[in-house]
Image (tube, rainbow, N blue to C red):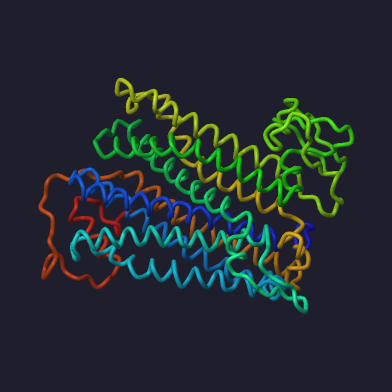
Amino acid sequence: MFGLEALELARIQFAFTISFHIIFPAITIGLASYLAVLEGLWLKTRREVYRDLYHFWLKIFAVNFGMGVVSGIVMAYQFGTNWSAFSEFAGSVTGPLLTYEVLTAFFLEAGFLGVMLFGWNRVGPGLHFFSTVMVALGTLISTFWILASNSWMHTPQGHEIIDGIVVPVDWLAIIFNPSFPYRLTHMATAAFLATAFFVGASAAWHLLRGRDNPAIRKMLSMAMWMALLVAPLQAVIGDLHGLNTLEHQPAKIAAMEGHWDNSSGEPTPLLLFGWPDMEAEETRYKVEIPYLGSLILKHSLTEPIPALKDFPPEDRPNSTVVFWSFRIMVALGLLMILTGVWSLLLRRGDRLYHSRPFLRLVFWMGASGLLALLAGWFTTEIGRQPWVIYGLMRTADAVSAHSAGQLGLTLALFVVVYFAVFGVGIVYVLRLVAKGPVVNEGREQGVGGAGQPRTPMRPISAADEALDEQGGDQLGQGN
């Protein structure tokens, strides 16, 4: 297919499916915690704005959660279909870690998700809030196990290789491998930021169209507080993650920096822009700041960072891709920090909700968190190449024995099905967002029990009726 080999098609297929998948868990993680905060604030203050926002974002969470589960199942199957050699070699480590995710996170979410979605008028407020918190906790536990597995592939330890198979000998070392704390905090923070800008863009969209009410304002205010506090924190976490990567995966850092040669012994400049040429072994058209690369990564004005020519050509990541994916991530992160600082300045004089240039920026930044997250994953995973398990197993040795034709066909089918199914789901979510939260008009709240409300034959309609009792739009009629 297009002259690509089976290995390349298998990698493209995995990259395509995981790129689609990762946006749903990211928003799920952030929205689950956001919903827990909203319900907690409602219980504490009894301000209707928090309840109205809870019911509005609960509908969006439910749809997003469903798409995340469906797209995640595909990822698990690919380990067996396209990467069977990897599963045979390292399944004794990755298999149990994914099993722990199911036994902890999935069971916790499954146990309380129904109460969270359908129990507002059927259980007490304390139990409902507890259910929301448990679902939020479940999303974070799921992140814990997934990142433990992924981090072990980058910095493997706690194992022995016996008869060509990885055998775990120290599970604590496997789980808490050297890169795990940095990857876990970086991913969780990225999910919170992605959700904050999604929520903020939703509020900005309504304000730009003249729809101004307490719920819309509260959405924007909470989102911008999150951006102001968490975006700078993410920059610090990212810097620590980079130092950890320099220690354990120096070739990745060299590729990210587009740095080729240390023969002069001079300190390494920071390349702002350029085009790394893998064939010519140089970065063309570069714009650089002297000494800054060494200062950031080595905290020194004299010591150079590792260069790509320090590694054999077959062990070098694709610097052209990694160089730019890293800079896209950093640029978006800086824009998030700028947006948060601007929001703080606008709070003086109550200008936050009226500055149209600011609202336009927030609207266009709506997808910035997800784009930065994807760019970060491309940097991490492409930068690990040519290893699937760093230093232990090459990607070329991990792929299943399929032909390029077979992989090309399945990739084409994935593209068609994903855009059809998840495209519709994403459009549906955006239509829900476009309706906006419905401010409660003081109607009596149902107390549950016989006839208040009835038990529906279709489970999803329970969400419709419960939310409609709060003055919301019916989920089942959102399109």
As displayed, is residue 223 above or below residue 452? above
Give the residue drawn at x 13%, y 55%.
445
Please state the horizontal and vertical placement of residue 218, each as a whole percent of the image: 29, 38
Quadrant (top left, top right, bottom left, bottom right) of the N terminus: bottom right
* Along the viewing direction, whichever of 64 and 129 lies nearer the viewer: 129
Residue 303, compared with residue 136, is above or below; it is: above
User: How many callouts does the rendering have?
Assistant: 0
- Residue 176 position, x and y percent, is 58, 60
Lateral position of residue 468 relative to residue 393, left or right:
left
Q: Which residue is drawn at 71% across and 48% down?
A: 247
| Residue 169 in view (yes/no) | yes
Quarter where residue 125 is shown: bottom left
Query: Which quadrant would residue 163 be assigned to in this image?
Result: bottom right
The x, y position of residue 132, in whole percent, is 31, 59
Kindly identify the residue that appears in the image at 56 percent across and 53 percent down: 181
Does the rendering let one see residue 273? no
Nearest the viewer among 298 and 209 is 298
Residue pictured at 46% horizontal, 73% vertical: 103
Expressed as whole percent of the image width and height from the top left, the position of residue 64 reads 42, 57
Q: Nearer the viewer, residue 18 or 35?
A: 35
Considering the image in quadrants, where does the C terminus appear?
A: bottom left
**Side of 109 relative to 51 (left or right):** right
Is 409 positioned to the left or the right of 140 in the image? right
* Quarter assignment of residue 28: bottom left
